[in-house]
Image (tube, helix red, strand yellow):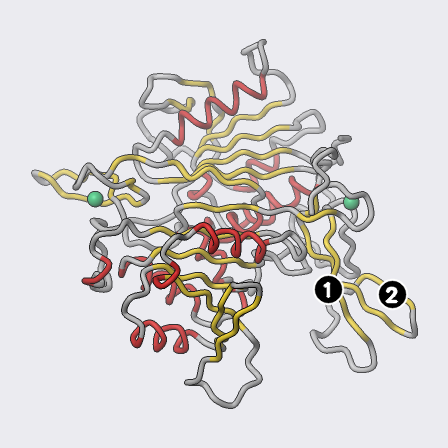
Amino acid sequence: MIDHLRNFNQGRFDIVTGSAQSGKSNKLITLINSFLGDKHELNNNLLVIKHPYDDKETASNISSFKKRSINAIECETADELADMINENITHIVVSGIHLFDKNIIDLCNELVMSNRIIVASGINLTYEGKPYGSMAELMAIADKYEIMVARCGFCDKYNAYRTQRIIENGKEKFQPRCLVHYEFKGRPDYNPHLINQEPSLEAIVGPMFSGKTDLLHTRYNQIINKDRVTIFKWIGDNRYSNDQVVSHNKDGIPSIDITNTNDIKNYLKKNKQINSIMIDEVQFIKGSYELVKELLYKGYRIILTGLKRDFRREPFGYPDSEISKILTLATEITNMYASCYRCKHPATETQRIIMENGIWRPASFNDPIVLVGSEESYKAACRLHHKMKDAPTNRYSNRFNKIKI
Ligand SMILES: [Zn+2]
Ligand SMILES: [Zn+2]
C-alpha cells in the first residue's frame, strides 16, 4: 500500500484526452498556469509545444473554447522537440501529441526518466474508432490521466467520450457523441437488454502490488444488484478444456475462471441477466482489446484491472500491446501506485528479480521468460530504483541531463 507521507520522487507524464469540445485545451492551459504559479509569464523551465496540425486556426498558441490562450512553439517531429530540451527545461507541455511520429514514445520515456514533467493533450481515437497514432503506447507509459467529457450532441443525455465525423452541406464537422450514439464501420449491434444503461469502461492500472484487485473487489461490493455482475479471472493457459468455466467464492466475492475470450463470450450468452462485467489481469488475455471493444459498444459496463507496463517498462505485450489499446477506449482510468521496495516512495514500475544460488539480482532485459534452475520474483519499484541490466538504447538515450528532485 502507498505511504502517503512520501512525495512522488520522479518524473511524471500526464495525458489529457477526450472527445471534441471536451475542454482539453482549457485543461492544458489550467495546468500550465498551475506550473507558473503567480508569475503568469513563461519562465526558462517551461517549454510549451504545439503540433502545427493541432487546431490549425490558432497558429503558435493553444487556445480553448473559453477564449483562453497561451503562447506555444510549433513543432512537428519528436526529433525537433528533443532539440528544444536544454538543461533548464523541467516541464514540457505538448498540445496534439497524437500527431507526432513514433519516436515520440521513446522521447517521452527518456524525458520522464530524466525526472522531467510532461503534460500532453491528444485525441485517443480516430473517427473510425481506432487508437490514434502512438496514443495507445503513450497512454501505457503515462502516469496520470484526465479523460475530458463533453455532452452527446445526438441525445444531449449521456456523456460524450467519442468524436463523430459528420458531413453537413458538403462540410466536414466533428461532433461529440456518447458510446450509444457513436457510429463507426463494423460497430456491433447494441444488446437489446442493455438498452437502458449508459455503457462505461473503467481501467484500473498500475504495477504489481499496487492493490488493483483489491480495488476491483471494492467496486464489486459497491454494486447493489449482484445478480447482474460477474468477475472473470484469468487463470493461465495450462488447462485442456477451453469451454468450461470454474467458479469460486472467496470472501463473498464470486469469480469465474477463464483462459480465453471465448469463455467470457459463452458465459454472457448463457447469462443474459448480466449487465456489468469485471475482468482481472486483462493483460494476459489474448484478444482482450477486440473483446472489450465489442462488449463496450454492445452496452456493457466494464471494470478491468491490468498491468500496463512489463518489467522492462515497455507497454505490456509491446509491440502489439492490447492493454495500451484498451486504455484508448476507457471512459475512466484509475492509476494505482505501489510502494517502492527500496525507498517507499510511490512505485510506478514492476521490478523483476532473479534468484540464483541464494543471491538475487535484477533481471536483464534479455533474460528468458523461463529461467531453468533459478527462481524469479517481482517487486514494485519507483523509476529511480527500477534496475534492468542490458536495457536497449534508443535514439534519445543519455541525451538529457537528470533533473534533481
Ligand atoms: Zn448520445
Ligand atoms: Zn525507490
Residue at the (57%, 61%) spot, across then down: 316
Label 2 Cα neighbours within 10 Å, binned few <14 / some 14-19 / many ≥20: some
- Measured as percent of width and height from the top left, residue 284 is found at 54, 69
Residue type at numbered disc 1:
Phe
Is 54 rendered above or below residue 243?
A: above
> Image quarter for residue 144?
top right
- Measured as percent of width and height from the top left, residue 150 is found at 30, 35
Residue at the (20%, 49%) spot, across then down: 181
Quick check: is the Cβ at mark 2 less than 8 Å away from ligand 2? no
The residue that mark 1 highlights is 365
Quick check: is the Cβ at mark 1 less than 8 Å away from ligand 2? no
Q: CA distance from mark 2 to mark 1?
A: 15 Å
Whether pointer 2 and pointer 1 mark residues with C-beta atoms closer than 8 Å, the reply is no
Viewport quadrant of the C terminus = top right
**In terms of depth relative to the viewer, which is nearer, 121 or 256?**
256
Residue type at numbered disc 2:
Trp
Q: In this rendering, would 47 be left or right of 378?
A: left
Of helix, strand and loop, which one carries label 1? loop
Residue at the (25%, 39%) spot, across then down: 176
Is 218 rendered above or below residue 257?
A: above
Is 195 rendered above or below residue 170?
A: below
Count of labels in the image: 2
The residue that mark 2 highlights is 360
**In terms of depth relative to the viewer, which is nearer, 88 or 206?**
206
Of helix, strand and loop, which one carries label 2? strand
Label 1 Cα neighbours within 10 Å, binned few <14 / some 14-19 / many ≥20: some
- Measured as percent of width and height from the top left, residue 99 is found at 42, 43
